[in-house]
Every structure is written in C-alpha cells, then in structure tokens.
C-alpha cells in the first residue's frame, strides 16, 4: 500500500467518524444529514482512490475512478445545499432553484462519467506511483471546470453575504 493509499484510508476513517458523530448528536437535523451525506460521498471517493493509488490494482483503477466520481460531483452539490441551510438563505425561492440546479448538473456529470471520462482519461504508473492523466481534449472537462468555478463563486458569495447579514 502506497503512502497515497494510506492517506485515502485515513480520510475514509475520518469521514466515517464525522458521519457517526453528526448523526449521533442530532440525526433529525437537516444540517447533520447534509454533513453526513457530504462525508459519505467523500468517504466513497477516498475508498475508491485508495484502490486507484495502489499500483497492484491498476487494472481496476478506471472502474474505481467511476465509482469515486460521487465525491467530486455529488459532494459539491450537497455542500452548496449545506451552506444555504446553515445561512438560512435556502428559504428564498431563487436559492432553492440554484441548489436544484447544482444537484442536476453534478448528478449529470456523475452519470456521464460512467460512459465518457469527464476529468481523467487513463491511469499510468511511474516509479510505483499511479497518476491520472487529465482529459484536456474533452468538452466535458472544460464544462466541469466552468461549473466548478460557478460553484466556487456561489459558495463564497453566499458565505460573504451570510457574514454581512450576521454583522447587522
């Protein structure tokens, strides 16, 4: 097991602990459920990358990459939902539509990734370390980057708006 696989294993364990604590203290809370969903998807991502980074399992790397896509897709949509829930902005209709938009877009990226590679096109081993080759030739890669930049903008805009609202 490489050091990258060990890091992914530790990340998986950490995410499982977050799920346990958040549901143990308040399993009925929307925020606890959203935190658990984010940790669950990140845990699947970590588990799949734990396999990907093991050079002995390179033949399975692409399959586990498809499974792990839940982390770089669905977790982002759930995190936008979480920031709107925490800030209280989810009550506004336009923000509900924005959350649904992110769920739809990231779910589409997740589904499409099973058939067409979105971010990585292949895996190679160099010095006993597995590398993913970025899919720079794909329209989907650049589409994902644009949606991700929109995600970053919405996330920080919401965070800054929430801070300004709290100061008043």
Image (tube, rainbow, N blue to C red):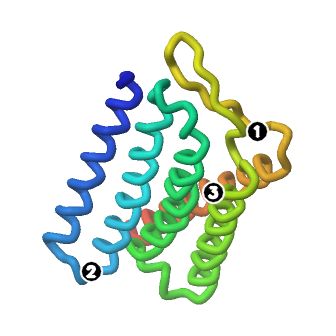
Q: Toward the viewer: 79 or 8?
A: 8
Give me the residue at 49% from left, 60% from top: 75
Label 2 Cα neighbours within 10 Å, binned few <14 / some 14-19 / many ≥20: few
Q: Upstream in the sequence, badge 3 or badge 2? A: 2
Q: Position of residue 26 (x, y in %)?
A: 18, 76
Give me the residue at 17% from left, 62% from top: 21
Q: CA distance from mark 3 to mark 2?
A: 27 Å
Residue located beneath label 1 in the image = 135
Labels 3 & 1 near each other (Cβ < 8 A): no
Discs 2/1, front: 1
Q: Position of residue 80 (x, y in %)?
A: 51, 66
Give me the residue at 72% from left, 48% from top: 117
Residue located beneath label 3 in the image = 153
Q: Position of residue 33 (x, y in %)?
A: 32, 74
**Which image quadrant: the N terminus?**
top left
Q: Is residue 165 left or right of residue 22?
A: right
Label 3 Cα neighbours within 10 Å, binned few <14 / some 14-19 / many ≥20: few
Give me the residue at 48% from left, 87% from top: 91
Q: Toward the viewer: 113 or 146?
A: 113
Answer above or below: position of 68 versus 6: below
Q: Upstream in the sequence, badge 2 or badge 1? A: 2
Q: CA distance from mark 3 to mark 1?
A: 24 Å
Q: Is residue 80 left or right of residue 144?
A: left
Q: Upstream in the sequence, badge 3 or badge 1? A: 1
Q: CA distance from mark 2 to mark 1?
A: 39 Å
Discs 3/2, front: 2
Answer above or below: position of 87 versus 151: below
Residue located beneath label 2 in the image = 29
């Amino acid at each position: 097991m490489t050091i990258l696989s060990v890091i992914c294993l530790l990340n998986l364990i950490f995410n499982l602990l977050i799920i346990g604590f958040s549901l143990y203290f308040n399993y009925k809370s929307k925020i606890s459920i959203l935190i658990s969903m984010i940790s669950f998807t990140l845990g699947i991502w970590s588990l799949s990358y734990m396999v990907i980074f093991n050079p002995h399992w390179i033949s399975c790397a692409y399959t586990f990459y498809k499974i792990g896509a839940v982390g770089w897709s669905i977790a982002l949509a759930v995190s936008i939902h979480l920031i709107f829930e925490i800030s209280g902005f989810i009550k506004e209709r336009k923000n509900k539509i924005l959350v649904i938009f992110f769920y739809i877009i990231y779910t589409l990226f997740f589904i499409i990734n099973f058939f067409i590679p979105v971010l990585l096109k292949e895996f190679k081993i160099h010095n006993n370390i597995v590398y993913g080759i970025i899919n720079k030739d794909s329209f989907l890669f650049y589409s994902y980057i644009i949606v991700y930049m929109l995600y970053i903008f919405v996330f920080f805009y919401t965070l800054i708006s929430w801070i300004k609202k709290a100061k008043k």
